[in-house]
């Protein structure tokens, strides 16, 4: 699979098998994040790898932004929480680059996982304070995103189908709608 093949075929997975991720593959996923570019190469990101089943259930059922929206992650083998130290990144043009740095690293991890047959789902609907409390994350660290990682289940669940339809996941704008040449 080429990088572009991974980009074209990757999708958010919301139903996972119970198969554990091999340690070797998990380390490759984490290495992909480590190798990402960042502001002045400061590498402000930090990743909390959660394998403890009770902590995963707490993240699934007690840290959602809207009720229990993340309940579907309760039985996944791994949740990775992407965090950053804003003081280790930059700020320019009104933008905090710790968000950009961490997003690049997390996306590299997700694409690497997908290449190995491991799914993920970028989660932004979470209560940062509750996630910090569950995982004992220091106050000065920002939680940017979290994602379950695991092998996709053979059949998509009803929840996954409903979210995909609601979100319009298959609807992509054309290049003509998003690309400008030489001027806006």
Image: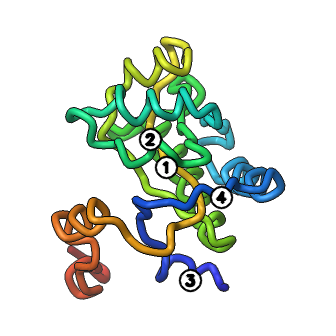
Secondary element under disc 2, as helix, strand or loop, is strand
Which residue is labeled 4 in the image?
19
Label total for image? 4
CB within 8 Å, label 1 to label 2: yes
Which residue is labeled 1 in the image?
103
Secondary element under disc 3, as helix, strand or loop, is helix
- Residue shown at 54% from the left, 27% from the top: 55
Q: Can the viewer see residue 46?
A: no
Q: Quadrant of the C terminus?
A: bottom left
Which residue is labeled 3 in the image?
4
Which residue is labeled 2 in the image?
145
**Crowdedness near tag 3: few (<14), some (14–19) or many (≥20) residues, C-alpha within 10 Å:** few
Specify which label sits upstream in the sequence, 4 or 3.
3
- Residue shown at 50% from the left, 26% from the top: 86
Specify which label sits upstream in the sequence, 2 or 3.
3
Specify which label sits upstream in the sequence, 1 or 2.
1
Specify which label sits upstream in the sequence, 1 or 4.
4
């Amino acid at each position: 699979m080429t990088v572009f093949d991974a980009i074209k075929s990757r999708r958010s997975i919301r139903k996972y098998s119970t198969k554990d991720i091999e340690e070797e593959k998990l380390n490759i996923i984490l290495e992909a994040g480590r190798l990402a570019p960042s502001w002045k190469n400061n590498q402000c990101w930090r990743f909390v790898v959660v394998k403890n089943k009770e902590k995963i259930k707490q993240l699934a059922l007690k840290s959602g932004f809207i009720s229990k929206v993340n309940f579907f992650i309760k039985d996944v083998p791994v949740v990775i929480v992407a965090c950053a130290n804003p003081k280790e990144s930059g700020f320019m043009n009104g933008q905090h680059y710790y968000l950009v740095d961490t997003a690049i690293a997390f996306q590299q991890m997700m694409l690497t996982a997908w290449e190995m047959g491991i799914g993920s789902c970028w989660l932004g609907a979470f209560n940062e304070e509750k996630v910090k409390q569950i995982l004992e994350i220091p106050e000065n660290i920002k939680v940017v995103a979290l994602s379950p990682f695991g092998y996709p289940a053979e059949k998509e669940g009803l929840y996954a189908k409903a979210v995909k339809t609601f979100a319009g996941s298959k609807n992509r704008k054309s290049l003509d709608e998003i690309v400008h040449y030489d001027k806006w």
